[in-house]
Image (spheres, rainbow, N blue to C red):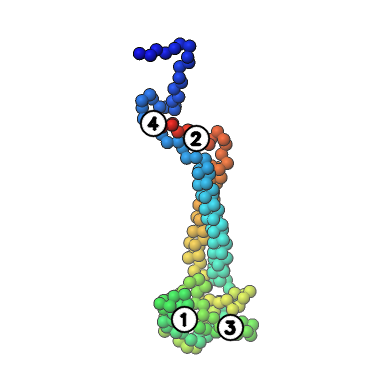
Amino acid sequence: MSQHDPRQPRPRVVRTIGQQPGGPPPPSPPRPPEASNALTRGLLAFATLCLAVGMVWAMFVFGRYRIAAGSRDWPNTLGQVMDCREGVSTPSNRDQLRNELTYRYDVDDQKYVSRNVSLEGYQAFDCADYPLGKAVRVYYAPWRPKLATLTPGEGAGNLSTQFAGAIVCMLIGLLLGASQVAVLFRPEWMRPVRVPRRPS
C-alpha cells in the first residue's frame, strides 16, 4: 500500500459553493450576459414600438374626437334629401350592405352635397324616414363647409374608448421600456456572475 510522501503537497480539491462531497452536481450556471442583453434589447425595442404606436394612435383619435364632439356647436342650415338607396355595398366589404343617403345644402350661396349621416362610423337609418325632397337639418364645419353631418356629436363616445386604448398602449410601452433600461444599465455588482461548469 502506497503512502503519501510528506515532502509532496497534497492535491487540492476544488468544490463549487454549496456542493457536498459525493453530492449531486451543482445547478446550471445562469444565462450568459450576452444572451440576457440580447433579450433585454429585444424587449426594449418592443416597448419603443408600443410607445410610438400608442402616441400616433392617440393623436389621430384625439383629432377625430375633437371634430365629433365639437360638431354639436357647428352652425347649421336646412338641406334637402336628394336620394336614399337601400342595400348598397361598401367599398371595403362587398358583402356588407347598408343604406346610403344623399342630401344637398347651401352655405354662403355655395352648394354642397354630402352623404354623411354621422361623422364616425355608419349610422343605421331607414330610408322610409328620408323621402325624396324632405328637409333635413345639416350641421357643417365652419372652416370646411363640405364637412357635414345630420347627427352632431355621434361617435364621440366610441372615440373616447379608442383614446383610452391608445393611452393603455403607451403606458405598457413606457413601463416595459423603463424596466428594461434599468436592467440594461444596472450597476456591475447587480449583474449575475457566471459560474464555470465542473469538468466531467
Q: Is residue 135 visible?
A: no
Depth check, front residue: 96 or 5:
5
The residue labelled by disc 1 is 100
Depth check, front residue: 152 or 120:
120
The residue labelled by disc 4 is 25
Q: Residue at x 54, y 81 (%)?
A: 114
Q: Quadrant of residue 67?
A: bottom right
Quadrant of the frame with the N terminus:
top left
**Which residue type does callout 2 highlight?**
Arg
Q: Secondary structure at mark 2?
A: loop
10 in relation to 99, above or below? above
**Which residue type does callout 1 highlight?**
Glu
> Within 10 Å of the Cα at label 2, are there few (<14), some (14-19), or many (20+) other Cα atoms?
few
From this viewpoint, which residue is outermost toward the front?
1
Depth check, front residue: 49 or 162:
49
The residue labelled by disc 2 is 194
Q: Residue at x 42, y 83 (%)?
A: 86
**Which residue type does callout 3 highlight?**
Tyr
Disc number lying in front (1 or 2): 2
The residue labelled by disc 3 is 112
Give the Cα separation between the discs numbered 4 and 3: 83 Å
Disc on the earlier residue, 1 or 2: 1
Disc number lying in front (2 or 3): 2
